[in-house]
Image (cartoon, grey):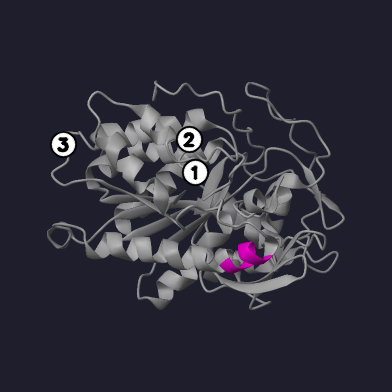
Amino acid sequence: MPVVALLSCVIAPLVHARAVAPLRTVGTPPAAPQAAAPLVSPSAPHGDSADLTALRDYVVREHEAPLDAVRRAVLSHPVVLLGDVHPALEPKRLLRALLEDDAVATRIDAVALEIPATAQRWIGAYLASTPEDPSLLFRESGTLRTVWGGSEEWLAIFHRLWLLSRDPRRDHPLRVVAMDLPGWPSRATSARAAVSLYGDRDSAMAAGIVDAIATCDGCAARGGARVLAFVGGYHVLRGLEADLSIGHNNGRVIWLATRLERRGVHPFTVLTDGLPRPVELGGAIVSGATRLFDVLAQGGWPAAPYAVETSHPFDVVAHAIREPNDTTDITFTLRPSTYRLRDAVDLFIYWGPTTPIGENSAPRRLGR
């Protein structure tokens, strides 16, 4: 896979790393629960189980359905950044379920997507089309996230947005924002250009969200704008930056949530985790992009999927977010090097094993 495709991932090397198990296909039941294991954090000293026990007690007490938790956040906060896992089906289904919820559907003002801004004209034409013409969404290659497959899922999301734009219960327009860099990722023609452009992406996305808030017609009378953004996982990290290396080319990335904070917009951030296949990363076989996933996957914890708000018990899992460390390709190093997950993320969704999104077999005329 070329570098320009890898740069779109939630944690890029996890997608092209060597798989160590077959894909779990749609309809295949998940593996049987593991036997109970000692409550030892992967990042805590061996045998130190006290804090992890506190974390389990908290998760058992506070976990809830992902849709319920994110629905409440969207209705309560001006901006919600919902993390995607690009090769997984479940986050897209969650986004669609949110858009199908009556309360969200009638209250939301804007939906911002990690799609190149060059797709904006075609999204606008599609939303205005009567009868519905999904073929317009194929005019810009990045609109349906074809680098990952699963165009059917994205067509279903856009179909829901098309319906919402015509919902008679809504008393205000729905704005759909293609907020990524124009032409991304095709503009990244080399590793050096990719490093430079990657640093610009979050700035562009932040500008798109801020503009959606500033130009929201009648939002003040409704208690302020409500914007839901759907982006890859790193972008939701508040207060964090990253040193980025691709080969011998280096740069700095300031993540979307951090940029919004610096512009006076305080997003509610949702990190979601669960890879469609175990991969080898940094010498370890992993099924999640975070070390928290390793903890929650142990026996004796609630069954996936669920959401839980981050709090003090999460502090036991240090360096919770795995960083790509492929010296032959792409490397991220988060800054500051010491952080607490609860400061960067408001809500964590544990998917458990996820379903890979399908191949690009979506029809061009049917947006269902």
Residue 256 in sight from this viewpoint: no
| Amino acid tagged 3 | Arg
Q: Position of residue 264 (x, y in %)?
A: 35, 75
Q: Is residue 156 above or below residue 234?
A: above
What residue is shown with label 2? 93
Task: Tell me, yes or no, whether the two marked residues, 2 and 1, touch with CB atoms within 8 Å.
Answer: no
Determine the residue positioned at 27% across, 40% down.
Answer: 105
Q: Is residue 25 above or below residue 12?
A: above
Q: Position of residue 72 (x, y in %)?
A: 36, 50
Q: Is residue 241 above or below residue 181?
A: below
Q: Secondary structure at mark 3?
A: loop
What residue is shown with label 1? 142
Q: Which residues are magenta?
A: 192-196
| Amino acid tagged 1 | Gly
Instruction: Work out how far the residue at label 2 is from the one at label 1, CA to CA, in angstroms.
Output: 19 Å
Q: Residue 193: say if magenta.
A: yes
Front label number (1 vs 3): 1
